[in-house]
Image (tube, rainbow, N blue to C red):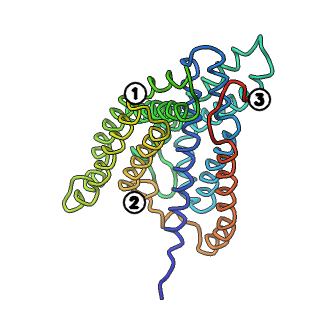
Amino acid sequence: MYSVDLTVIWAFLIAFAVITYVILDGFDLGTGILFPFLGNGTNRDIAMNSVAPIWDGNETWLILGGGGLFAVFPLAYAIIMPAIYAPIIVMLLALIFRGVAFEYRFKTERGRWLWDVSFFIGSLFAAFSQGIALGTLVQGIEVEGRAYAGGWWDWLTPFSIATGLAVVFGYALLGATWLVMKTEGEIAGIARRYALLLGVITLCAIGGVSLWMPFLEDEFFARWFALPEFFYVMPVPIFTAFAAFSLFHSLLTGGEIRPFISALSLFVLGYVGIGICFWPFIIPPTVTIYEAAAPENSQIFLLVGASVLIPLILIYTAYAYWVFRGKVSADTGYH
């Protein structure tokens, strides 16, 4: 009889929620980052309309990931949050700015520029803050006993800034490829040109951060360069190269859907690479998923709810994307 490791199941569920948030909300944050560079007001209207029906549903996964971390891995939550309070607060304020911009931009003509700026700044700072938080976790959080032992500014380092910029450019790439897929005419051409440039920048950022990470912790280095582990992890960079080729080939040959899928693949593969470095730690290199986990009874109780909630979220998310499939034009509005 096989035993079920609830802690591992929950670790994968939360990891799934986080990557789902990244790939879904990433492209609508990226659309906001590109907002000032899309030309005239009509193009900006089309760009906003392409994400307006789905943006708030995408953020469901952020709540699920954060709530799941709090409920199932309370020790990790208690240690991680004090280390990244500043970027998390900035992210939440930025997301509020974006939400207000969605609701008010189409209600005014004279003040529309203000909501355009709010949409851009909110998107930019939300993306950058998420990258800062990721970099802080990857570089290591100082832990003493069962509590955070670092300082207020530990999140601000060259590595975290680099990951913040990498996320900004990566999200902008997702936004550009999303617009290539969802729009046509002038805005699609602009998005395609930006996608080519952002693809190069994003790949350079992925390469730089990936080469930097193994030197942050000895365990990270061993996962990627020690034998025989080296051969086990080699598929990740190989598939990344294939995804990069697919991205540029499809952009240059007029593809519409494949650039977006290829860009998403780069994010998923990067996430897998981080997972390889982390496992089985939730706060490397000090706290494992087992040390941070809630009691088994709590995990069982929460898993019952998640087994209902997660399929429902997947169903209504898929339905929303199905309803709003196809191209977005200037005469399809969000009011």
Looking at the image, residue 94 sits to the left or right of residue 109; the answer is: left
Residue sitting at x 62%, y 27%:
47
Residue 281 rendering spot, x and y as whole percentages: 42, 59
Numbered tag placed on residue 279 in the rendering: 2
Residue 215 or residue 153, whichever sits in front? 215
Q: Is residue 26 left or right of residue 109?
A: left
Give the residue pinned by disc 1. 196
Residue 179 placement (x, y as % from top left): 55, 31
**Amino acid beneath label 2:** Trp
Q: CA distance from mark 2 to mark 3?
A: 41 Å
Q: CA distance from mark 3 to mark 1?
A: 31 Å
Residue at the (66%, 19%) spot, across then down: 116
Q: Could you say which quadrant of the image residue 42 lies in?
A: top right
**Residue at disc 1, secondary structure:** helix
Residue 13, position as x, y percentages in the image: 55, 61
**The C terminus, quarter of image:** top right
Question: Dot 2, how many residues are within 10 Å of its Cα: few (below 14), some (14-19), or many (20+)?
Answer: some
Sequence-wise, which precedes: disc 2 or disc 3? Answer: 3
Query: What residue is pinned by disc 3?
Result: 103
Q: Which mark is residue 171?
A: none
177 up-or-down from 41: above or below: below
Q: Is residue 200 above or below residue 259?
A: above
Q: Residue pushed farthest left? A: 227
Identify which residue, 14 or 294, lies in the foreground. Answer: 14
Kindly indicate whether the residue at mark 3 contacts the one at mark 2 (C-beta within 8 angstroms): no
Q: Label 1 crowding class (10 Å Cα cut-off): few <14, some 14-19, many 20+?
A: many
Q: Quadrant of residue 301?
A: bottom right
Residue depth check, mark 2 versus mark 3: number of the one nearer the observer? 3
275 shown above or below 59? below
Looking at the rendered structure, the secondary structure element under dot 3 is helix
